[in-house]
Amino acid sequence: MAEFVFDREAVRRKLKDTGVSQQALAEGAGLTHRSAVAKILAGERQVKVDEAARIYNFLRLVPIEQERTRVVPIIGFASAGRWREAVEMPIGRMTLPHHVAGARAFAVEVQGDSMNKLIEDGGWIVVDPDDKVLAPGKTYLLQNAEFEVTVKQYQKTPARFEPVSSNSEHECFLASDHDFVVLGRVVWKGSPL
């Protein structure tokens, strides 16, 4: 279970901004007495997890852990190998650090070994569809005219997409050889469990 970080300063600011008294907070959060709130805010008394949650709930504060994370949908599977039909099937959701991706980011499970030096077969990637500018050494989710997808790393001279694999059977392709669109840049990766 993630540790709940109690931010005394955020609670003090919220009390000041809203004009809520320590007595009202004690009553609203189910604490025994105003002195309990005073001691918690002074750092003289350790706050229990359930008390912290009630205080945050009463003041409508968002825990630091939630502010620093983002939930993205896992929308299906993508190939790390030859072009393959995309499988779009909601699988679930995953949490990642907030700064990693934009608001429209999504995750997919990668199947295949053409990127296994970076992304294991069965691993997960988070794709930012708002980041499509090609940069050398960055990895992208691509879709061809037949709506098949693949994951590859871009290299500039000549403009091409390469596998990053221990399997020598996988080949790169020139950007000019295929009619494709960049669905987004891979901004995070995770390993299978």
Image: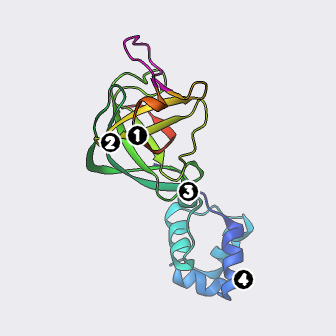
Question: From mark 3 to mark 2, how far is it between C-alphas?
Answer: 41 Å
Residue on which the image places disc 3: 65
Q: Secondary structure at mark 1?
A: strand
In the picture shown, does residue 129 fall above or below 159?
Answer: below
Residue density around tag 1, few if under 14, some if 14–19, many if 20 or more, within 10 Å: some
Mark 4 belongs to which amino acid?
Lys
Q: Closer to the N terminus: mark 3 or mark 4?
A: 4
Residue 180, label in figure:
1
Mark 3 belongs to which amino acid?
Glu
Residue on which the image places disc 2: 145
In the rendered structure, does residue 169 fall within the stretch colored magenta?
Answer: yes
Which quadrant of the view contains residue 191?
top left
Nearer the observer, 84 or 24: 84
Please name the residue shown 66% across and 73% down the image.
11
Mark 2 belongs to which amino acid?
Ala
In the picture shown, does residue 111 fall above or below 17?
Answer: above
Q: Which residues are magenta?
A: 161-173
- Count of labels in the image: 4
Residue on which the image places disc 4: 16
The mark lying in front, picked from 3 and 2, is: 2
Farthest right residue? 42
Q: Secondary structure at mark 2?
A: loop
Which quadrant of the view contains residue 165?
top left
Q: Closer to the N terminus: mark 2 or mark 4?
A: 4
User: In the image, 83: left or right of 173?
Assistant: left
Residue density around tag 2, few if under 14, some if 14–19, many if 20 or more, within 10 Å: few
Type of secondary structure dominating the magenta stretch: loop
Q: Secondary structure at mark 3?
A: helix
User: In the image, 155: left or right of 94?
Assistant: right
Q: Secondary structure at mark 4?
A: helix
Task: Please report contact status of discs 2 and 1: CB closer than 8 Å, yes or no.
Answer: yes
The mark lying in front, picked from 3 and 4, is: 3
